[in-house]
Amino acid sequence: MGIKVTETGIQGLVIIEPQVFGDHRGFFMESWNKRTMEEAGLFYNFVQDNHSSSTVKGTLRGIHFQYGDKAQAKLVRCVRGAVLDVAVDLRKDSSTYKQWYSVELSEENQKQFLIPRGFGHGFVTLTDHVEFMYKADNYYAPEADGGIRWNDPTLAINWGIENPILSEKDTKSPFFNELENKISFTMADSGQ
């Protein structure tokens, strides 16, 4: 089984489209195959699988990341409904530092987004009843948990929404300029 890998213009950040086999019964696809990914030049050892459910359109989760040796690479996908998924380059020595990229992930398009370590990540739901899944290459570590305010003016992310539904935690996330000196990701941290 093959995959299609599309570069985003931000080093290491790629969109993956697995081969999907469908018929009148539905479909089958491999959402993760280590050998296939390595043949495509993507070397990750995922250790945790997470599932998020959002009931209402306009729910925004993020921008999240983990600091230091607890940083996580993620392979994300939407298995029900649709989301606008966003990754922000936080690697200080990257030529795309502070730039972001967004992609629509949905149950229809079956796209996946591979986000290396050194990125902030978040998504906003485009439909009601969204099921979102992702693999991480490092375990969740609450002591290393970080976040950036969703509407940070320095990053100026176009979420396509003015008043999202947020968690209490996300409403209190700091702005980028409050964190910039604490963030120490580099290209080497992401394996790039």
Image: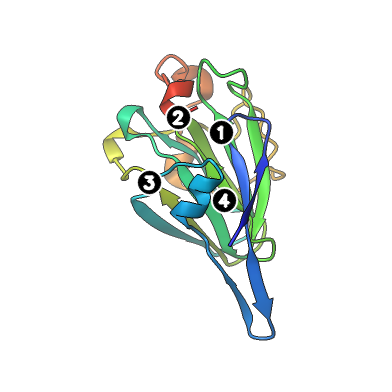
Residue at 33% across, 50% down: 47
Q: What element carries label 4?
A: loop
Q: Which residue is drawn at 57% across and 53% down?
A: 59
- In space, the residues marked 3 and 4 are separated at their CA atoms by 33 Å
Q: Name the residue under label 1.
A: 12
134 to the left or right of 77: left
Whether residue 99 is situated above or below residue 53 in the rendered picture = above
Q: Is residue 78 above or below residue 100?
A: below
Among numbered discs 1 and 3, the one appearing first in the sequence: 1
What crowding class fits label 2: few (fewer than 14 Cα within 10 Å), some (14-19), or many (20 or more)? few
Quote the CA–CA distance across marks 2 and 3.
12 Å
Disc 1 from disc 2: Cα separation: 8 Å
Q: SS class of the residue under badge 2?
A: loop
- Looking at the image, do the residues carrying marks 1 and 3 touch, with CB atoms under 8 Å apart? no
Going by the numbered disc 3, the residue's amino acid type is: Asn
In the rendered image, which residue does mark 2 sit on? Answer: 191
Q: Residue at x 58, y 47 (%)?
A: 113
The answer to whether the residues at label 4 and label 2 have Cβ atoms under 8 Å apart is no
Q: Name the front one of labels 4 and 1.
A: 1
Instruction: Confirm or deny contact between disc 1 and disc 2 (CB under 8 A).
Output: yes
Q: Are marks 3 and 4 in contact (CB under 8 Å)?
A: no
Graded by Cα atoms within 10 Å as few (under 14), some (14 to 19) or many (20 or more), the crowding at tag 3 reads: few
Write down the residue under mark 3: 45
Which residue occupies the foreground of this view, 5 or 152? 5
